[in-house]
Amino acid sequence: MEQGFFELKVISNFAAAHNLREFRGKCENLHGHNWKVEVVLRGKSLQNNGIVVDFGEVKAEVRAILEEMDHRYLNELPAFSTDNPSSENICRFLFEKLSKRLDTDARRLYSVTAWESEDACATYIVE
């Protein structure tokens, strides 16, 4: 029998403005989004209390990072001074920051998805 794992997801959001450099389209102009962010962790084992991680702990870490981006012009943040603040780069940026805070021997950040609208998103996954 194959070893299974648990997958946990938290969803949060932030609002921010950005523009995409060298895009050659409407998104090259300054505009904003109400971003939805999905964070997925995976764990193979449970703690003695029957959980992989407290959802409150994950939500607090996500909120702390999103607070740095909320109601900001993303192009002015150091992380996006040269890289476009695209959905792809936003989810990779969030993944890199969150994995440092959330990864343990028992669990790993699996993916971060950044939704810029209800029908368009990008996901960064490390396997």
Image (cartoon, rainbow, N blue to C red):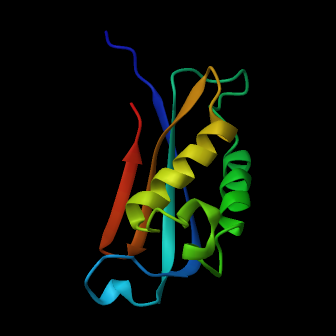
Task: Please name whichever residue, 80 or 49, is drawn nearer the observer in this view of the structure.
Answer: 80
Residue 45, percent across and down? 57, 20
Question: Is residue 57 rendered to the left or right of residue 78?
Answer: right
Decide: is 116 above or below 106. below
Q: Residue at x 35, y 65 (%)?
A: 121
Q: Determine the residue located farthest toward the left in the rendered image.
A: 24
Residue 12, percent across and down? 58, 65
Residue 125, percent across and down? 39, 42
Question: Is residue 7 rendered to the left or right of residue 28?
Answer: right
Task: Please name whichever residue, 87 or 63, is drawn nearer the observer in this view of the structure.
Answer: 87
Decide: is 52 above or below 57. above
The image quarter containing residue 78 is bottom right
Question: Is residue 108 rendered to the left or right of residue 114?
Answer: right
The image quarter containing residue 60 is bottom right
Task: Please name whichever residue, 44 or 50, is drawn nearer the observer in this view of the structure.
Answer: 44
Image quarter where the N terminus lies is top left
Residue 11, percent across and down? 54, 60
Image quarter where the C terminus lies is top left
Q: Residue at x 73, y 27 (%)?
A: 49
Task: Please name whichever residue, 100 or 61, is drawn nearer the observer in this view of the structure.
Answer: 100
Decide: is 4 above or below 19. above
Q: Which residue is drawn at 40% across and 65% down?
A: 87
| Label total for image | 0
Q: Residue at x 67, y 47 (%)?
A: 58
